Image (spheres, rainbow, N blue to C red):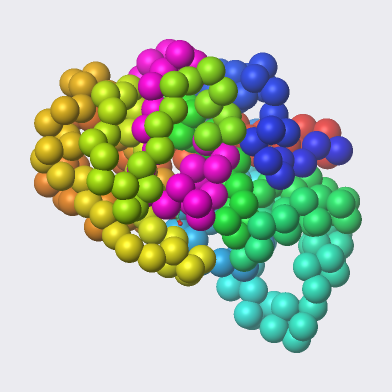
Amino acid sequence: MKHLVSIDDLTKDEIHEIFVQTKKIKAFPFTYRLNREHTILSNLFYEPSTRTNSSFFTAMTKLGGKVLNINNVNYSSVSKGESLKDTIITMGNYCDVIALRSRTAGDALKASQVSTVPIINAGDGNGEHPTQTLLDLYTIWEKFNRIEDLTVTFVGDIENSRTIHSLDKALTNCNKHYRDTYNEEPWPKSDVYYLTRVQKERGSRGSYTMKKEHTNTMPEESIVLHPFPRNYEIAEWFDTDPRAKYFEQMKNGLYVRMALLIAYTQYK
Ligand code: MLT
């Protein structure tokens, strides 16, 4: 059975297939209605989420399936001390695929070792966030028609951002630069600027803001991405700049997750 624990679990060809499927869904979303009727997704979330949780929910609903949404595990038997293993085994009896968000890096791998249904890692602590990476990559691909031979600058919480960890792994043939919160060096001219918030809940400290002196040197054809939520990294004045692609990025999250759910429930 195929799980998506790390972005490394997908080959380049599989990522490309997901892009092609996503493009079709984005162009004709209605065509995919009922594609997964009677399929059940369990959204098992041990950490807060807005975009990932809602887009998985909407993706499965639009495909005609149903969602068991446990987005506050405190209302489940977890509050009675149930282990991750027992919870995963239990949920496997009631659904066809599990999107798991957990607090600790490595939990998605542990879950995949006991699960009877595919596990999709929806973010494990400061580990990885492969489905975010797919929508990040898709947004890059939409703009540049490739995900290689690009210059990418990661800005923000390099150490604890799981979105950076996964995207960094996926962008193999790119020229990459890193500017963490305390790094005052100018940002190099890039095709993609990928900003993240400071992960305070994981012990990171500090803050930073993208200023006019940064944006003034960004190429006209570059794009600025951010997985959101944002804190101080990008002020709202930049939202109307054509290089600001983060709202399109979050919209792509829905289509990418529809494509992913189709792929991960095809052998059920
Ligand atoms: C995540 O779940 O990692 C978010 O989408 C990004 C963040 O929390 O900063």
Residue sitting nearer the eye, 132 or 21: 132
Residue 153 placement, left or right of 93: left
Query: Is residue 177 visible to the viewer in this orientation of the structure?
Result: yes
Quarter of the image that includes the C terminus? top right
Question: Could you say where residue 98 lies in the image, as x and y percent from the top left?
Answer: 72, 53
Q: Position of 90 compared to 230: left or right?
A: right
Q: Nearer the viewer, residue 127 or 97?
A: 127
Is residue 151 inside the magenta stretch? yes
Place of residue 25 in the rendered image (x, y in percent of width and height, measured from the top left): 51, 27
Where does the image place residue 87, in percent across and percent down from the top left?
A: 80, 68
Which residues are drawn in magenta?
Answer: 141-167
Rendered residue at 73%/59% (across/down): 107
| Residue 109 image point, x, y percent | 77, 51
Which residue is rendered at x = 81% and y = 50% of the image? 112
Name the residue: 60% across, 18% down.
Answer: 16
Asked whether 143 falls inside the magenta stretch, the response is: yes
At 62% across and 52% down in the image, what residue appears?
A: 127
| Looking at the image, residue 84 lies above or below residue 40 | below
